[in-house]
Amino acid sequence: MSIALTNATVVPCTGEEPIEHGTLVLEGDRIAWVGPSTEAPESGAEQVDCTGKTIMPGLCDAHAHLVYDDVSDAYTIELSKPVEQAAIDGVLHAAKLLRLGFTSIRDVGTRGNVAVLVRDEIVRGRLRGSRVKACKQIISVWGGLGDFHPTHIFKREQYATALTEIVTGPWEARNAVRQQVKDGVDWVKVEASGTGFNPLCPAERDTISAEELQAVVDEATDKGKPVACHAESRNSIIKAARAGVRTIEHAIYLDDEGLEAILEHDVAVCPTLGLYTAYAEKGLEFGIPPEVVTNHRRTHEKHVEAIRKAHESGVVIIAGSDSGLSNFPQGGALEEICAYVEVIGMSPHEALLTATRNANRVIGFDDAGTVEPGKRADLIVLGENPLERIRAIAEPGTVEAVLQGGEVVSGALAPAAVTSA
């Protein structure tokens, strides 16, 4: 079926200027034509008048955790509920993100193999949700990011269905990658530093050894899988970039040496700045443990400074939320986009690129992320242009319709205005 969306402001997210009074012609799941309405080709397409609307690519959350649901602190984070509950949460959140306008996501850490299975069921058409690039568990080390509990409370065998997989030494690291590849991952996630969420392992602390990290990257590369690396400390950022990871998550203590390594090795950065801002500014209001809030307040100013410098230096920034926590629910990448304008100083156009073209290219959905002929018709229709007011994109009701593969999957396309050409 052919559909023409007419008379809209089209934000192509290609780096080019918006098209005022533009038309998109959709053929099946693809964009067949885009341009000024006055130049639209004659066709038998169904005509949908989108006067006053803005059309742009569907959004991408490049740092999602589908299993996160109202997580409040490190001592309950994803370890207190059964993996079966995590699977249900994953299904519900994939559907929610799609309704919010996220036509694609990258899940960078799950319980068991939930993200892979949700991905596959969406592809099969049995579930409705964002398209997923999936990791399995985060590869971690004892005393590292994912080792949340004192040893007398949690033993190694209890991590079998946790958010992290604990390894010791390069060979265990390689074997973890081999098993994850066997189980169908698109990406491998590894950690190289602590975090403000873990009172036992702060953000400034390096964790995994250079040998273990290199083993993860080498094995994943051999198997054709890119690596995402949680790296907040100064040395972990440098180590990760030089090891050959594709993306660095958070990058709080990025300095000049780390910036040089990132640029030299063509590494993208996924800051998750909105989440860290929420914890620093509003964590106590939502019952977040004081020590966790204190950690984020300590690092927040440095984080903002680091991401601003990365952006000004030409680092590819991709939007990711890390959402699903008590004061930062699923869909937080909408706030991430706003933070890039309000805190970092990006233009609205630059901020939208982080969640469309940039994110889709980096995570591996090369067929989406821009409004161009031949690209998938993964689109959102908005009642207000976020280029004029970026905060609008995060406000309820602004996204009036979501199209995935040319099909309206949420909202409506003004059915009263539909006529046959």
Image (spheres, rainbow, N blue to C red):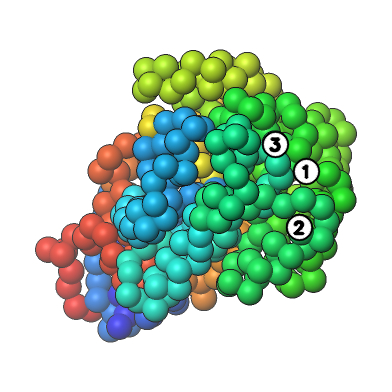
Q: Earlier in the sequence, mark 3 or mark 1?
A: 3
Q: Which residue does the image show at 53% across and 22% down from the upper left?
A: 292
Specify the quadrant of the image occupied by residue 386: top left
Q: Earlier in the sequence, mark 2 or mark 1?
A: 2
Q: Amino acid at mark 2?
A: Ala
Q: Which residue does the image show at 60% across and 34% down from the upper left?
A: 152
Residue 349 horizontal/vertical position (percent): 53, 43
Are there few (<14), some (14-19), or many (20+) residues within 10 Å of tag 2?
Answer: many
The residue tagged 1 is 208
Are there few (<14), some (14-19), or many (20+) residues within 10 Å of tag 1?
Answer: many
Query: Secondary structure beneath disc 1?
Result: loop
Query: Secondary structure beneath disc 2?
Result: helix
Task: Please give left or right for residue 329 compared with residue 75 in the image.
Answer: left
Q: CA distance from mark 3 to mark 1?
A: 9 Å
Q: Nearer the viewer, mark 3 or mark 1?
A: 3
Query: Secondary structure beneath disc 3?
Result: loop
Q: Amino acid at mark 3?
A: Gly
* Dot label at residue 143: 3
